[in-house]
Amino acid sequence: MSQNVSDVSPAARDVQPAASAEDTPQVTDRRTRRTRLALRDALAEEISATGDLSRVTVTAVTSRAGVTRRTFYSHYKDIPDLVNCIEKETVAELRPLVAQLASVHLDQLADAINHQEPCPGSQEVLSYFKKRGSYLRPLLGEGGDPAFSQCIRSMVHEVVAGRALDGIDLRAVGAFFDYYLTFAISAEVGVLLRWLEGGMRESVRTMARIMTALMFVRPGDLYDSPIELDLPSFALAVMLPDEEDNN
């Protein structure tokens, strides 16, 4: 005998068809991530192919990624937005790794150097770039976004500055310290970019050891003629007003 809708209990009427796996948030999130990774990699490939980020188009990126333009625009406004999202994510992921590196005490660093080992935490930073080199190298390279490396430098300076002042000789505080920190960060980031551009031929551990040692090499050391610098006195002299400053 047929059953009318009115004969069905309220509980039974409230039962909804089971959602398909394709409709679950988890599956949607995985699909979204796959799409964004495909677009990220396609962007990097286009930069490498054209040699210039400014020449990369949405059409070329979607073609490489195997998605439609409509799909692209459901995630990003345009190519600059895609680039900005990748860079912001990179800087955010690097921040805790840099903080870990900056938290190393001088006695830990001295012990590592005495055993010809890299500074603790440096391998984690380099491993991050190694795993993501396929897309970070084009973005940070000559044809990529010139502002990207500066964003990284700014983040490192922000994270390191406060920690570096802890226990510092007060005679080195001021302009000398600020320029030293800028110099050190620019040097390390520059070496990192050189490693990326060179295809990361050296292993992560080897490169970490090199970058650790470079911070302590004086020009004279390379020529067996070390130059001794009374750093506190030199820094103090820099802090004193120069005659030219009064003109």
Image (tube, helix red, strand yellow):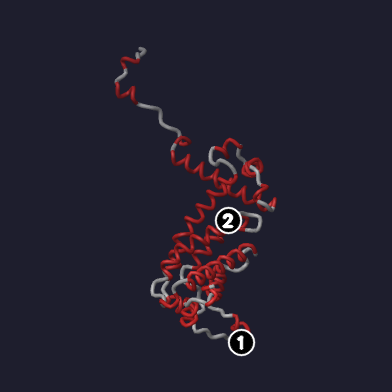
Quarter-wise, where is residue 58 in the image?
A: top right
Where is residue 3 shown, x and y percent of the image?
35, 14
Query: Does residue 68 sit above or below 39 in this rendering?
Result: above
**Lateral position of residue 5 relative to residue 121, left or right:** left
Q: Secondary structure at mark 1?
A: loop
Amino acid beneath label 2: Ala
For the residue pair 192 and 238, the one nearer the viewer reads as 238
Mark linked to residue 68: none
Residue that numbered label 2 is attached to: 147
Question: How far apart in space, not on screen, are marks 1 and 2 (Cα)?
Answer: 39 Å
For the residue pair 56 and 66, the one nearer the viewer reads as 56
Residue that numbered label 1 is attached to: 224
Q: Looking at this rendering, what residue extends furthest in the top direction?
A: 1
Quarter-wise, where is residue 13 in the image?
A: top left
Decide: few, some or many residues near mark 1? Use Cα within 10 Å; few <14, some 14-19, many ≥20. Answer: few
Where is residue 153 shown, x and y percent of the image?
52, 62
Query: Does residue 80 sit above or below 180 in this rendering?
Result: above
Where is residue 189 shown, x and y percent of the image?
56, 65
Q: Looking at this rendering, what residue extends furthest in the bottom direction?
A: 225
**Lateral position of residue 53 relative to residue 19, left or right:** right
Where is residue 221 shown, x and y percent of the image?
59, 83
**Lateral position of residue 245 relative to residue 53, left or right:** left
Amino acid beneath label 1: Asp
